[in-house]
Image (spheres, helix red, strand yellow):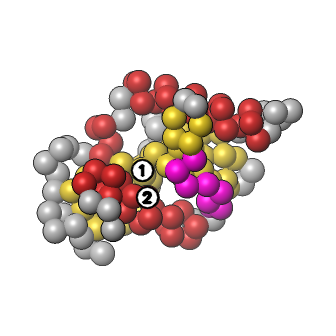
Amino acid sequence: MAKGKVGLGRRGEALAVAPLIARGFTVVAQNWFCAVGEADLIATRGGEWYFIEVRTRRGGVAGAPEESITARKRARMAQVAQHYLSEHFPDADPAWHLALIAVGLDHSGRLMRMTLYLDLEGEPEELLNGEA
């Protein structure tokens, strides 16, 4: 497994896939890149598209994962979503959402919580809370 921030991020992304699938999502892309940025996960459910940022923090030193989503990051996420949709569905206007999965690990790297926000301003749904 990769080390550092990239390895931590990739671990969080890998942990996030199974709970999404269990809730009826189909993950269609991971780490999708374009000229304006990257989408960690792209998923569909019920005919709607979800562009999911996965933020992982270990030990709480850097704050909660949710705190790291800035206005600039939101704007970049929207640009990536629009780029993906225009590339894959040029003649359609599907419903889409910017979503977040916040992953919290303890100091030793054990999964402690995973929270899904189907819309960045929406109510959270606990995918995991407490010891795994």
Q: Is residue 35 above or below residue 102?
A: above
Which residue is the extreme one toward the bottom?
132
User: Label 2: how many residues lie within 10 Å, few (<14), some (14-19) or many (20+)?
Assistant: many
Residue at the (65%, 57%) spot, across then down: 28
User: Measured from the top left, where is residue 31 in percent x and y?
Assistant: 52, 50
As drawn, is 27 to the left or to the right of 15? right
On screen, residue 56 above or below 106: above
Three-letter amino acid code at the position of disc 2? Glu
Residue 113 visible in the displayed image? no
For residue 15, side relative to residue 89 (left or right): left
Instruction: Identify the mark at residue 54; answer none if there is no mark.
Output: 1
- Separation (CA) of disc 1 from disc 2: 6 Å
Circles 1 and 2: CB atoms closer than 8 Å: yes
Is residue 27 rendered magenta in the image?
Answer: yes
> Which amino acid, mark 1?
Val
Q: Residue at x 30, y 46 (%)?
A: 65
Mark 2 = which residue?
Answer: 13
Where are the magenta residues, as a range?
A: 25-32
Does the magenta segment cover residue 37? no
Q: Quadrant of the N terminus?
A: bottom left
Residue 87 pos. (x, y %)? 74, 36
Q: Quadrant of the C terminus?
A: bottom left
Residue 96: percent from left, percent from top: 65, 39
- Count of numbered badges drawn on the protein: 2
From this viewpoint, which residue is outermost toward the right?
91
Residue at 13%, 48% (x, y): give it. Answer: 61
Dominant secondary-structure state across the stretch colored magenta = strand
Residue 27, picture quadrant: bottom right
Asked if 76 appears above or below 126 in the picture, the reply is above
Query: Looking at the image, which residue is at 58% across and 67% down?
Result: 21
